[in-house]
Amino acid sequence: MAHKDTTSTECTKEEPAENQKRYRFELYHHQRWWFPTGWSNLLLPQDRAVWTDAHLEATPSINNFCLPPQTTSVLPDTHQQKTVSWTWVDPEWSRYQDATTDKNGWEYGNWQWKQWTFQSIGLGICTRRQKWYRDAQRTECLVQLPTADHQPEEMVYWDSQSIETSNSSSSGSASSLSGIMTPVDPIIVVSFDNKGERMLRRRSSNLSSKSVTFNNTIQVCPNSPSADDLYNKYCKSPKPQTFKRFSI
């Protein structure tokens, strides 16, 4: 019985003939004769299985036999993925028949499964076997994998509410800050200058995990606290402080 591994990736074009090979699967059906019931699938413990391959290895029956499963493998140092697929060529299983078998394809042997003959009646005829076969096609397909130089561009996603804010601010006065988009990130950073940014990063654990958006246009106020004042107020206090929402 032919048996190979197989794959799951689909090929977009027909493979050349050298990548397609045909295999024949052969199964044997074994029976023993019992008095008074006659021929039966009931075998002795030391006998072979009811259904085997040509090497007497147990297999499913022709009603339950399936092609090998699909498999996918990556070829080393080639950046190629090999796909192997199996398809049945014959629609059904066929019964083997020649001069050594009877009209139903049975061969008859003795108690030890030897001395095969096409005659079903005779001294010492106790066993019989029947050969079934079916052809299948194995197809290999190579797919080129993307290399490091052709990786897809990384997409950056922004908070939709922040995008709307940036669109409204871009159409405002000349003093407004246009094009402000806040990435969706659990840590909120509002950059005043280097010292203010460090201060807010240290205190970010006390902030809410939700992104902050500004409903109004941000403008520069002359009386707004400087970054040094914010740093001295919140970062040098004896115990942690909690940020409160404030408007500028």
Image (cartoon, rainbow, N blue to C red):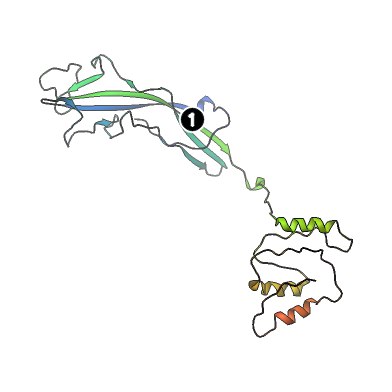
Closest to the observer: 103 or 231?
A: 231
The one nearer the camera, 1 or 130, is 130
Examine the rendered structure and indicate whether residue 191 appears above or below residue 235.
above
Q: Position of residue 45 (x, y in %)?
A: 17, 37
Q: Residue at x 48, y 34 (%)?
A: 84
- The image quarter containing residue 138 is top left
The three-letter amino acid code for the residue at tag 1 is Thr
Q: Quadrant of the N terminus?
A: top left
Q: Which corner quadrant of the image does residue 47 belong to?
A: top left
**Residue 179: x %, y % from top left:** 80, 58
Determine which quarter of the picture holds residue 163: bottom right
Q: Of all residues shown, which one is farthest toward the bottom?
A: 238
Q: Is residue 5 left or right of residue 170?
A: left
**Element type where label 1 sits in the image:** strand
Q: How many marks?
A: 1
**Residue placed under numbered mark 1 in the picture:** 139
Vertical side of 8 occupied by 132: above or below: above
In percent of the image, x 78 and y 79: which residue is there?
Answer: 228
